[in-house]
Image (cartoon, rainbow, N blue to C red):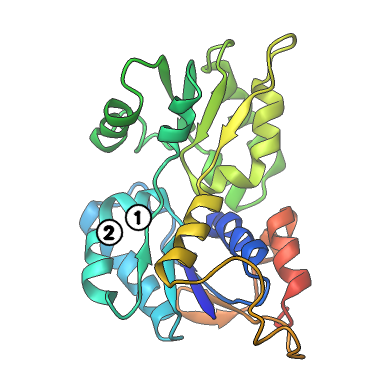
Amino acid sequence: MKIALMDSGIGLLAAAAAVRRLRPDADLVLSSDPDGMPWGPRTAEDLTGRAVAVAEAAAAHRPDALIVACNTASVHALPTLRARLEPAIPVIGTVPAIKPAAAGGGPVAIWATPATTGSPYQRGLIEEFAHGIDVTEVPCPGLADAVQYADEKAIDETIAAAAALTPRNVRAVVLGCTHYELVAERIRAAVQQPGLPPLVLHGSAGAVAAQALRRIGARAGTDPATDLAVPAPGLTVLLSGREEQLPRTALTYAEGRMLAETSPAL
């Protein structure tokens, strides 16, 4: 089994690690676009062009499914990607986990990029899944870039700024950018208030990984046919179409280190 994941940068690590946990025997193809990131400020047309190039680089490795591990690309490019690749390669998009967060009651905060915060797309999800729930949209300028480059000082500053905009009584925080899942516990520590119930964080990595397996009719756990096979699962890293190693900054995060430890390519 081979699962491909795409993003502008290393935000795909969380979903890749989730796939690895569900299917330790799966080969992974990680396709990102360091030459063109960030995608957020680009026009929808320009972003879609970059996303198509990244997706086609991954598709050349003949994966069984492609996960679009990027909220922004899922908003703007998912229909185009599906039109180009399906039905040969199922394409799974990433949607902010507003529905499960709202199911637990409010108040809820949604941390997202400035481009997504207040967008018709996000407002539509709130209206559909969180109608009547106290929801606060929190813009997080610079946080995705800080995570991408593992800039510890900038991560601390941008998380602190977003936490200051988050109501003290929130019960759940939706992580509306895949990069944020890599620093989830730091977000939790910044938002959790003494004396209140434990804060619930809602990311998308686990859900998209599970959906990818469902789309190809696979179950979690290793394939009995490969249990006795000697080779460890492979990891192919594509940086703007070039086959290289996982970026050094990826090893800053637990998800990146887990992939490095379980894949012989590194």
Quadrant into which the N terminus falls:
bottom right
Which residue occupies 72% across, 26% down? 189
In which image quadrant can residue 48 be found? bottom left
With 23 as the anchor, is 76 left or right in this view? left
For disc 1, the marked residue is 73
Residue at 49% from the left image edge and 15% from the top image edge: 107
The residue at 41%/51% (across/down) is 94
The quadrant holding residue 170 is top right
Q: Nearer the viewer, residue 90 or 180?
A: 90
Which residue is farthest front? 224
Position of the C terminus by quadrant: bottom right
Note whether 85 is above or below 62 in the view shown.
above
| Disc ID at residue 77 | 2
Secondary element type, mark 1: helix
Give coordinates of residue 74: x percent, y percent.
34, 54
The alpha-carbon separation of the residues under discs 1 and 2 comes to 5 Å
Label 1 close to label 2 by CB (< 8 Å): yes
Name the kind of residue labelled 2 in the image.
Ala
**Residue at 41%, 34% in the rendered image:** 99
Position of residue 218 relative to residue 169, above or below, is below
Residue nearest the viewer, comparing 60 with 148? 60
Quarter-of-image position of residue 11: bottom right
Q: Amino acid at mark 1?
A: Ala
The percent position of residue 246, horizontal first and vertical second, equals 65, 71
For residue 200, say whether it is visible. Answer: yes
Location of residue 37 in the rendering, given as x and y in whole percent from the top left corner: 44, 58
Asked whether residue 32 appears in the rendered view, the answer is no
Q: Relative to 253, is 138 on the left or the right?
A: left
